[in-house]
Amino acid sequence: MTLQQLAYFVAVADVRSFTRAAELVGVAQPTLSRQLRALEDELGAPLVDRGGRNGPVLTPAGEAVLPLARRMLADADTARTAVAEIVGLRGGRVRVGATPSLCIGVLADVLRVFHTQRPGISLELVEDGSPPLVRTLTRGELDIALVIVPPGGVDPALHITPLLRERLSVASPAAQPAPSGRGSLTVRELSRRQLVVPRQGYDLREVVQRAFADAEVTPRYAVQGGEMDAVLRLVEAGTGVAVVPDLVFAGRPRLRRTVLTPALYRTVALARRADLTPTHAVRAFRETLLSFLAELSAGNGLPGDVQVLHRPDH
């Protein structure tokens, strides 16, 4: 079994065509087919059903092997990157994942600082909800990710560093009267307001819906769906109010913050695969992120109720 054979198999699984898979990996189709057959012979079972009406289809054995093949290829790529850094062939690469609210609230500045400090390191950003980011991390397709820690904890295959504890507050248009004269809202009072919520898959949406269920009230939705930036723009335009993390209020003068009572909090953590040693580039990114958050905290640059949970190692 070779990495090349695994790469050919993954290509066929991804595009469901031997011809397009061969083009993708840059070999002739007979070569790809021959190598895939050799892999199947070694494993003792066919991985691809070649008789499908709509192209190649993975067999049960192929479905079982596919995630393992992806992980092996990702591990090999990580090893090549680490060695290249050590011998000075290139600056390295960091594949970063983050939830949309964190991309808006803190990560954009961290990426800017890191790129300025280390322009030779390639940065790749994936923006998604925490559950998809965790799955991508465990497959080895990300090096590190900022995720929200769920009530039951994260996947044990991951090593996490808690970063922030932040409050969730109600965002409303600054140009309109405050939603409450006393500066706070209960969930029951919030249920009487028109609400803007992000799309399915956002941890934030699930937390808010759970809060309404616990209070035994039904929310009134003005708009459902969209990414975090769209939610904030809809609130600024006066479409409704939204429950958002305190970090997103930074640099948004058109938003008014009103706290929820009782308070809702969430924990942001930095996650990576526990079985992989981080590369020099990934360690450098981690230190830049921790230093940036520490400086914000020391200078009172964090909006609302946000607490830094971890400090730089140096």
Image (cartoon, grey):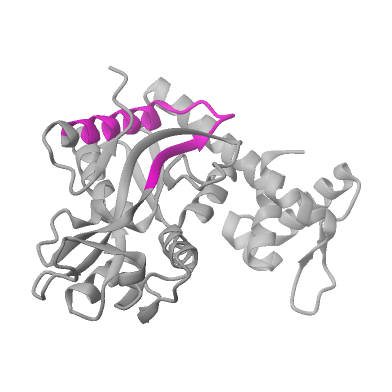
* Residue at far right of view: 44
Q: Is 78 covered by the magenta stretch? A: no
Residue shown at 14% from the left, 61% from the top? 252
Q: Position of residue 159 (x, y in %)?
A: 51, 32
Looking at the picture, tell me which residue is in the foreground, 72 or 174.
Answer: 174
Looking at the picture, tell me which residue is in the foreground, 78 or 97.
Answer: 97
Quarter location, residue 29: bottom right
* Residue at far top of view: 314
Looking at the picture, tell me which residue is in the foreground, 84 or 293.
Answer: 293
Residue shown at 20% from the left, 61% from the top? 258
Specify the segment rendered in magenta.
Answer: 266-295
Quarter location, residue 300: top left
Quarter location, residue 174: bottom left
Q: Is residue 73 above or below residue 181?
A: above
Q: Position of residue 71 (x, y in %)?
A: 63, 42
Q: Is residue 30 above or below residue 138?
A: below
Q: Is residue 184 left or right of residue 32?
A: left
Residue shown at 39% from the left, 32% from the top? 282
Looking at the picture, tell me which residue is in the foreground, 145 or 263.
Answer: 263
Q: Position of residue 81 (x, y in %)?
A: 46, 32
Q: How many marks?
A: 0
* Quadrant of the snapshot with the C terminus: top left
Q: Position of residue 128 (x, y in %)?
A: 43, 58
